[in-house]
Image (tube, grey):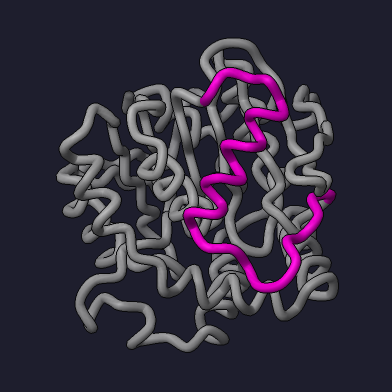
Amino acid sequence: MRYFPKKSILASIAKVVKNSISLKLSRCEVAGRSVGYLSGGEGPTLLFIHGWAVTPYVYKVALDLAARSGNRVIAPFLPGFGPSEAFSGSWPSSSQISQWIEAFFDELGEPRPTVVAGHSLGGGISASYVSDFPGQVERLYLLSSVGGNSTPAENLTETRSALEWSLSLPLDLLSSQASYNHVISMVGTGLIQLVRDPVGLWRLSRLARNYSLHEELSQMARSNTRVVVVGAVSDKVITKDSIMHLARSASVDPVWVSGTHSWISTHPERFIEVITNFH
């Protein structure tokens, strides 16, 4: 078990770039539907998948730090989020989302990612993608990720309703000591998604709390993909037991950072510390 302290020399860097974001918003078409994405930087491709009820904008400082650290950052808006058109009908299966990510890179004409990182629900999607296309990705970062469901004692299905799971996110944010403007920004993003597609957001919350990555991570433990499982010590959304189970499934020790579930956006320097120090 490894732990990052609260203070970091990269904190000053985060403050410098906070008002000078270099990531660019672009659009393309995937299967006839518009998809928005943020991109920037040069180097190996780093794919970032955002979490439930938010968009890549929430992580913009952390992603900009990654782009300025020698990575080509690609962060798509998942279907139904931001400028990306939603799928018709219900939210697709994990394998369909994996195919969507592959088609997205086909349209971009960009090299396939060698590094994939996902936060919360995005972690589950990232792991499914890496598992569905083995041999492509060198490193996978599961950042306060869903997917640690195992025994009834650890299974979110047994302990929380979808409503309780959904409400844990704003409660976690309020305890994160984030700035007033940051809280308003994140809550506003969630409200926009709620108004835009309340049924879709509800379905996603059910998907997130029921996600299990045991099979995918067990498979990756026998491959050449390096899996890094990261948990936040004060996370009120993803439990410690869930993170520990993810790590056991991947046959790795978890990495612990200080902060809450929103640590990547409230303390972006910790994100670059993780991808710099654990590779």
The number of numbered discs placed on residues in the rendered structure image is: 0
Q: Quadrant of residue 124?
A: bottom left
Q: Is residue 128 magenta?
A: no
Answer left or right for 23 relative to 9: right
Answer left or right for 50 relative to 44: right
- Quadrant holding the C terminus: top left
Q: Position of residue 61 (x, y in %)?
A: 67, 34
**Residue 155 visible from this viewpoint:** yes
**Residue 13 visible from this viewpoint:** no
Q: In this rendering, is residue 181 above or below 154?
A: above
Closer to the camera, 120 or 179?
Answer: 120
Q: Residue at x 30, y 37 (%)?
A: 227
Closer to the camera, 75 or 31?
Answer: 31
Q: Is residue 101 magenta?
A: yes
- Quadrant holding the N terminus: top left
Stretch of the chain drawn in magenta: 83-112
Q: Position of residue 25 (x, y in %)?
A: 82, 33
Answer left or right for 114 relative to 51: left
Q: Position of residue 163 (x, y in %)?
A: 57, 86
Q: Residue at x 49, y 36 (%)?
A: 271
Q: Residue at x 45, y 23 (%)?
A: 114
The residue lying furthest to the front in this view is: 31
Q: In this rendering, is residue 48 above or below 205?
A: above
Q: In this rendering, is residue 105 above or below 152?
A: above
Closer to the camera, 45 or 254?
Answer: 45
Q: Residue at x 79, y 71 (%)?
A: 191
Q: Position of residue 237 (x, y in %)?
A: 46, 69
